[in-house]
Structure formats: structure tokens, C-alpha cells
Amino acid sequence: MSEATTIIDLARLSLAHGEGRRLDAPVRLEPLGLGGQTYAAVPNAVPARLDLSRHSSGYAFRLRFPLRVEGPCMRCLEAAALDVEVDAREVSQEGTDDEELRSPYVTDDELDLSRWAHDAAVLALPTQLLCRQDCAGLCPVCGESLNDADPEAHDHDTAPDPRWAKLQELKLDE
Ligand SMILES: [Zn+2]
Ligand SMILES: [Zn+2]
């Protein structure tokens, strides 16, 4: 466990049943994996706000923080960035064997805020990170970005490379 891990000691808060608490703490986020790429949170320490309340049977948590990720566009590899508001909830029932009611982030009265924040960040991200909504991607023939490009400049089919034409003939003869 790294030193940058933020753990909340629930027992030390000594909340009575029905009592709540709000905690603001910076949480360092590990790089986020998305679609085979790795994206860094910028800054990687996010100002996390944790609301927790104690009930007769356990705890309820709400975690919120603003998240900005930067990395390559999934279509054209240009720099891309995205801002989302992460808003996640968890409940943790005490003394139950029911996996559904136990939070995977709570162990022995300790809430692993870093791990939860990381997972919540991944869930809050869209499946694609693009430099812009309508990113046209790369030309499949020459590999140049098609954004802001003259479409006719990439109409490669009209002037096939003679070598490719030869290859195609070979294929047809098979
Ligand atoms: Zn793009
Ligand atoms: Zn092209």
C-alpha cells in the first residue's frame, strides 16, 4: 500500500447511530485505464468530498469530486481532455455475510477512499475519450488526421497506387 493511499478510519470518527459527517480530503488517483489507453487525472490529487452517515446497521457514503483526464484521442491520437463530476454512493452493512450489502472498500472499519475514488473515476468516464465529439479520426490509407482536412485530399481511391492494383490482380487470380 503506497503512502499516498487515503484511508478513513471509521471507528475513530466515533459516530453515533443517525449521526453524519462531511470530510474533505485530497485523494491521489492512480492512472486510469480506458479502452486500452492510460489516462492521467490532472491534477492527480483531486479534492474529494466524502459524506458519511451511520445507521443502526452500518454506514452510507457519498463521494464527490471533479475529475479532469488528459490523454490521446482514441481516434486520432491528438491531445484530448475531459471534465466530469464524479458522484458515487456506497453502503456498508456491519456484521453481514451478504456480499451485496458489504462495500468492497470497507475492511475492518476502514474505508479505502483511494481505491473507491479510482473505481468511481473509471465508472464516471465515457467509454471513449475524443478530442472532439465528431473527431473524424485518421485516414485509413495515409494515416493523416482527417480533422480539418480537405476530404478530397484523402480520396485515395480515385488514384490507386499502381503497385496496389497489381496486388489486387494477383489476388483475383487465386
Ligand atoms: Zn481526435
Ligand atoms: Zn489520406
Image: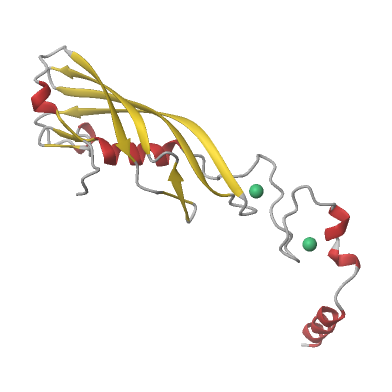
Residue 73 image point, x, y percent: 59, 49
Task: Look at the image and name its color scheme.
Answer: secondary structure
Q: Residue at x 84, y 65 (%)?
A: 156
Counting the numbered discs, the total is: 0
Left or right: where 137 falls relative to 105:
right
Task: State which image quarter holds ligand 2.
Answer: bottom right
Residue 58 image point, x, y percent: 15, 24
Left or right: where 165 falls relative to 83:
right
Q: Residue at x 72, y 55 (%)?
A: 145
Against 75, residue 27 (above or below) is above
Residue 170 image point, x, y percent: 80, 86
Left or right: where 120 falls relative to 25:
right
Against 151, residue 105 (above or below) is above
Against 130, residue 64 (above or below) is above
Single out the residue that lies furthest toward the right: 158
Foreground pick, 3 / 83: 3
Left or right: where 122 falls relative to 101:
right
Foreground pick, 138 / 41: 41
Residue 20 image point, x, y percent: 20, 14
Q: Quadrant of residue 122?
A: top left
Q: Quadrant of residue 166?
A: bottom right
Foreground pick, 129 / 24: 24
Q: Residue at x 62, y 51 (%)?
A: 78
Single out the residue that lies furthest toward the top: 18
Question: In what quadrant of the picture does the C terminus appear?
Answer: bottom right
